[in-house]
Image: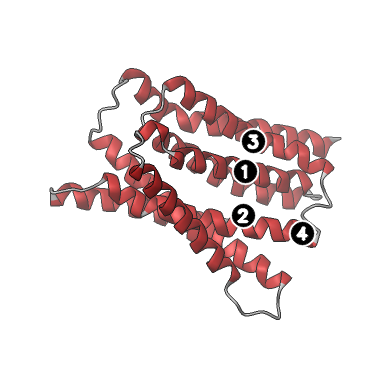
Amino acid sequence: MIFIGYKTIAALLIFLISIATAIYPLNKLRTNHEIDHNESFELGEALASGIFLGIAFFHMLPSAISIFHQLFNHMNYPIAEIISMFGFSLLLFLERLSLDRSLSRSQSIIPYTLALILIIHSLTEGAALGISGTGTEALIIFIAIIAHKSSDSFVLCMILMRYHFPLLRIITIVTIFSLMTPIGIGLGTGLSLFTQSFSGQLAEATFDAFAAGTFLYIATLHHLRFHQRLEEAQSLLEFSCMMIGLIAMGAIALLV
């Protein structure tokens, strides 16, 4: 009963931190409905791109490679890398398709795809915490979720704002995203056998690899589409912000 109470508190803290991280960009949208792309906004997006790169290379892709190696230790084929490149190519195709059809930014499938990926990943992380059977294991997973959840929430808001989503729609998507980890924690308690099975581990590794590819695309080609700078000083400043996000994720990977 005490352990269940701990998980309940963890779920509440994760939800509150996710919402709190989204307050700044949401307040920016509330006070400026036209979303003036000033310097602070652009630097925030550069930081978000660095966070995406870090999550992809320091968290998701290594996790997928490790699980595939455990499941198919006799196979040297780069399964995780192939799936990751598929995710990268799929988003590139979807964005090019939306551009060819002359869709507006608010109608693009890219932010919805990104939100869906983050929501599914949050649900998976929550389930991992719910499934954990010891206090030490649960604490380690909790720290990892906190480290990435806040970053994901910030990045999601930045992308939705870039596509000029209405404030109410952004709040709805962010709230759903923030609730997914607590829901996953609840579901994980009743699904303790899922991630221990072969099919469960295979599904987790496949999703992590696919998500890594999509994050790589968002942080590189998708970012460059909106950032064509003529001022060298501004370009270097944005690059510095991107590196800060990347280095921060690398430091978190060392700690957790």
- Mark 1 to mark 3 CA distance (whole Å): 8 Å
Dot 3, how many residues are within 10 Å of its Cα: few (below 14), some (14-19), or many (20+)? many
Identify residue for label 3: 180
Residue lying at 67% horizontally and 46% vertically, measured from the top left? 124
Left or right, residue 160 beside residue 12: left
Relative height, residue 18 to residue 224 (above, below): above
Name above or below for residue 213 compared with residue 97. below
Disc 2 + disc 1, Cβ < 8 Å: yes
Taking the spot 73% from the left edge, 70% from the top edge, the residue there is: 71
The local secondary structure at tag 3 comes to: helix
Sequence order check, earlier mark of 2 and 4: 4
Q: Which residue is mark 4?
A: 199
The residue carrying pointer 2 sits among few (fewer than 14), some (14 to 19) or many (20 or more) residues within 10 Å by Cα, namely many
**For residue 13, above or below residue 151:** above
Give the alpha-carbon distance from disc 2 to disc 4, as whole Å: 12 Å
User: CA separation, marks 2 and 1?
Assistant: 9 Å
- Secondary element type, mark 1: helix
Give the Cα distance between marks 4 and 1: 17 Å
Sooner in the amino-acid sequence: mark 4 or mark 1: 1
Q: Which residue is mark 2?
A: 207
Q: Which numbered disc flags the more N-terminal residue, 2 or 3?
A: 3
Which quadrant: the C terminus?
A: bottom right
Residue in front for this viewpoint, 76 or 10? 76
Direction from residue 71 to residue 240 in the image, left or right: left
Q: Looking at numbered disc 4 in the image, what kind of residue is underneath it?
A: Ser
The amino acid on which the numbered mark 3 sits, given as a three-letter code, is Met
Q: Which residue is mark 1?
A: 120
Q: Quadrant of residue 75?
A: bottom right
Mark 4 in CB contact with mark 1 (< 8 angstroms): no
Q: Percent position (x, y) of residue 151? A: 48, 43
Task: Tell me if label 1 and label 3 are in contact, CB under 8 Å.
Answer: yes
